[in-house]
Amino acid sequence: MKGKRSAVKEKLVVAIMTIITLPILLPYLWLLLNSLAKGVYWGLIPQRFTLENWSFL
Amino acid sequence: MGKPTNKTLMSPKLMQSLRSAPFIAPFIILVFLFYLVPVLLTAVLSGTGMDFTMRFNFVGLKNFARILSDSVLPQILHNTLVYVFFTCLLNVGFGFILALLTTYFIKNENIGLFFRTLWLLPRMTPPVIYALLWLWFLDPTEKGMLNVIVGAFGRPPQNWILNNPMPTVILANGLIGVSLGMVIFSSAIKSIPDELYKAAMIDGAGDFKIIRHIILPLVKWPLMFLTVWQILSLITSYEYIMLITDGGPLFNSEVLSLYSYHKAFSNLEFGYGAALAVILVLIGILVTTFMLKVFGFDRMMDPSRLNA
């Protein structure tokens, strides 16, 4: 019973951590998606996949 | 009458100092060249009216008299105080919460490590890229990331940076500093022996009591070290403010270090900028001395008492 409660608590903390990490994660995700897309829809969702931006490699 | 030996000529303490000199000399030379000499040069420069002509025309204490009558200085000092206090609070307080969540509450080491790594991203990112991310995130157009999110709730787009310049720079700077606090507190929490938690649990202590009576007292020294470290580095830091708001709008997010930079390198008033920098150095020395006395750094540098 105690072990189950502890597992639920840990899952809750993971959920809280995910929410508070989003402001850090989202801009980096946006940066990565933008580098692989020709444009972004609603500021976040990539529109057309491209590797053009990586051609410098 | 034999020849005097080394033993009679030099005291053991002097011998030890001489022996350690080659090891410590490179660091003394580095500190002298890159810390002390710039401070001395700034002090000399502050006594001149040097401008774009780059001439050393000594004006005595004229620059310092000008500081006293500078009409924007009260606002800049207020901004500096607000910026240092709230950013330090975020760095230390939120760093402690993150360490607690990822180390104490999340028992799965891999998950804790995953979140800690994510929070280290701003620290690993070049400042210009990090500042650009904030500018894109808070873009005032309807395509701005935050405006897209608030738009989903039917709110109109806002100019976040223009309307909230100080909270923006505090948040941007705070989220970088938070990683240092998180790493230091995580290691401090991990060094607490498991037996202490087990004994507390057997005695019926819940999480809150364990944090209050076991974790907090045992991370007291890292907490104090971090507070002092962050205050001192925040007093002199300005690069993220410069990149995100450049001290604006008007002087709403201008801090003393940025003001000194602007005066020297934007207005080309090197003498006045140097005088402001001297004031900054004096504030730094005063704060350090005060902190050393209040927090008792000698005791802080003692070996750990955890396993004593």
Image (cartoon, coloured by chain):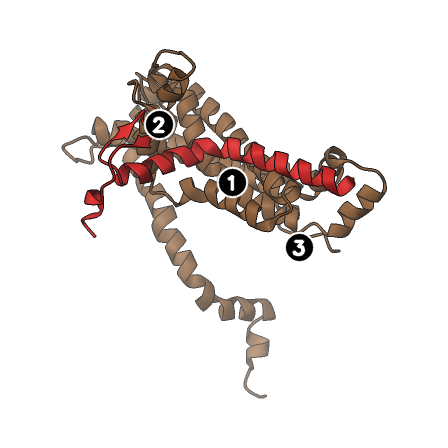
Chain colours: A red, B brown
- Name the quarter where the N terminus of chain B is drawn: bottom right
Looking at the image, is B86 positioned above or below residue A50?
above
Type of residue at label 2? Phe
Badge 3 element: loop
Marks 3 and 2: CB-CB under 8 Å? no
Would you call the spot at circle 1 few (<14 residues within 10 Å), some (14-19), or many (20 or more)?
some
Labels in figure, total: 3
Looking at the rendered structure, the secondary structure element under dot 1 is helix
Q: Dot 2, crowdedness within 10 Å: few (<14), some or many (≥20)?
A: many
Seen in the image, is B58 located left or right of residue B187? left
Tell me the residue that label 1 is attached to. B229
> Label for residue B303?
3
Labelled disc at residue A14: none
Separation of residues labelled 3 and 2 (CA atoms)? 45 Å
Question: Which residue lies most toward the bottom here?
Answer: B2
Chain of the residue under the numbered disc 1 shown in the image: B
Badge number at residue B137: 2
Asked which quadrant contains residue B52, the reply is: top left
Amino acid type, label 1: Trp
- Please tell me which of labels 1 and 3 falls first in the chain: 1
